[in-house]
Amino acid sequence: MSVQGPQPETFVHDPAGNLLSANEDNQQNEQPATEQDSSRQVTQNRLNFFGDQHYAYDDQGNRTQTLRGKGQQLVTHFTYDALNQLTKVEHNGVTTTYEYDPLGRRIAKRNADKTTTFLWNDDVLLSETTTHIESDNQESKEDKSKQTEHKTYLFEPDSFNPVAFVQNNEIYHYHTDHLGTPQDITNAQGNIVWSARYRAYGNLALADVEEVENNLRFQGQYFDEETGLHYNRFRYYDPNCGRFINQDPIGLLGGLNCYQYVPNPVQWVDPLGLSCKENFWNQFQKDTKGHFANSAEASKSYQKMKEVAAMGSWEEKVNRPDPSTYLPQTYIDAHLDQFNQEGAGFVVIGTWISNPKYPGFPPRKFVGLKSEMDAVIDKYHASGNDWRVIRDELSLGANVDLEKDEILYVTVDPSDDRFTFDMPTGREAGAYEGEWVPGGKTKGGTKEAALVGAEDVLHDNSLDELATKFTDSKKIK
């Protein structure tokens, strides 16, 4: 694989997606790695060496040592707690320790020179405070007051894309690329105070302007100068070799390779260090290809969709505009044509229809495209009937627990004249705050539509009764 840009690079991967070598096109190695080197370089997806660096691991798959230099005499040591959280790094004679809150968020890092503490807004970094440790030469009180630096971050709603930060009562604005990676930072006067270029896997290739400090990198990542690693919420990412230093906390739910960052770093992101996703803007361009006259129209539509998605409160939700105001009619028609041709599917949770006040469905119940819903159900069965697959794929809510629920899978035949399909507006009862996104897809990527006529189906608070209303339905849990 090769990447063309300010820093052209060429990569070699093995079939499991492990990065074996990365070379700048003007600095090719005499003997670049090949896929055949994989058996020696990688064991159980654990990278043994990359370039001049060699790695060691503990029984849990955590990287414990990085050895480099002549005869691998330069050693970086990594220490972990019982939760596989990195707690100490010894690198170049400097020891840095890390602390976490009960939710696993890093709240402090300390070494002999300084201490940095962090505050969080859910999984998004809110602020950091750095206190520089004084030397034996005591300074005046006036100088001591300058030893603490505070920075507050602002991000787009429900996003890991940075917008600005405030430091010393000055505001600075981020300018990011399509992935949400900072490219430039400007001050209130519009002057560039930080600017950089990156290699494909996130290493800083060149800092053109550095009048202010910026440690934000890929979405959800924070650069640690003491190690060169990026803190990525649940794990640490090594941009030098394009992979995490320990295994995925969610195991195979995050993918078959528990160390892989993303399949393609110029299209995908992993803000939490758990499971990657394709960048929304890239996916939007794919979904709407051929429906806009130019990229400027597509960008305007995308920005409007983000505004609609951010209308999360009840007062805002009921005022969400019609999709035709921000999506091309050709896209809406093509989307609904798929439902009219193959039908739809949806799952019903037993306890969710148990309230006797509501013996039927609400208007415009959400349904998924049949072929894609069938794929979700197949994935659920392949997981050993792990109900979390249903929850996450269909964006039912991160805190939803279906452990004790019965689940019915229902399909809607396209010839069923009781129903028609419409593009979701976000005003529906099922458009949960933080879960619904505009454009006719769930956050998990399943195509969805609003089932017009659903309110006429009476289930009488019974899955068995509901099953009689459709020709094809089955209990899957």
Image (cartoon, rainbow, N blue to C red):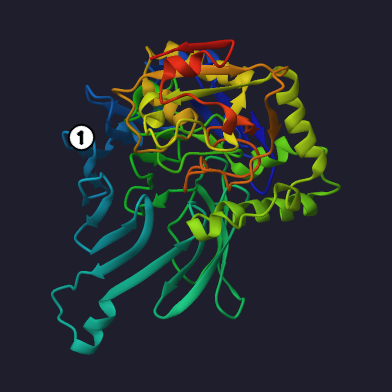
Q: Determine if residue 99 is in view.
A: yes
How many callouts does the rendering have? 1
Is 328 in front, or is 254?
Answer: 328
Task: Identify the amino acid type marked 1.
Answer: Leu
The x, y position of residue 242, in whole percent, is 47, 35
Within 10 Å of the Cα at label 1, are there few (<14), some (14-19), or many (20+) other Cα atoms? few
Residue 308 left/right relative to 140: right
Q: Determine if residue 31 is in view.
A: no
Residue 129 left/right relative to 345: left
The x, y position of residue 367, in whole percent, is 58, 28
Which quarter of the rendered picture does the C terminus lie within?
A: top left
Which quarter of the rendered picture does the N terminus lie within?
A: top right
Is 384 in front, or is 323?
Answer: 323
Is 423 in front, or is 297?
Answer: 423
Position of residue 73 relative to residue 133, above or below, is above
Position of residue 424 relative to residue 94, above or below, is above
The x, y position of residue 365, in whole percent, is 56, 34
Give the residue displayed 32% in from the left and 64% down from the top: 128
The x, y position of residue 388, in whole percent, is 38, 26
Quadrant assignment, res 119: bottom left
Quadrant assignment, res 441: top right
Give the residue displayed 16% in from the left and 33% down from the top: 82
Residue 241 left/right relative to 140: right
**Which residue carries the number 1 mark?**
83
Give the residue displayed 73% in from the left and 32% down from the top: 335
- The extreme right residue here reads 293
Residue 416 left/right relative to 226: right
Q: Secondary structure at mark 1?
A: loop
Give the residue displayed 28% in from the left and 48% down from the top: 105
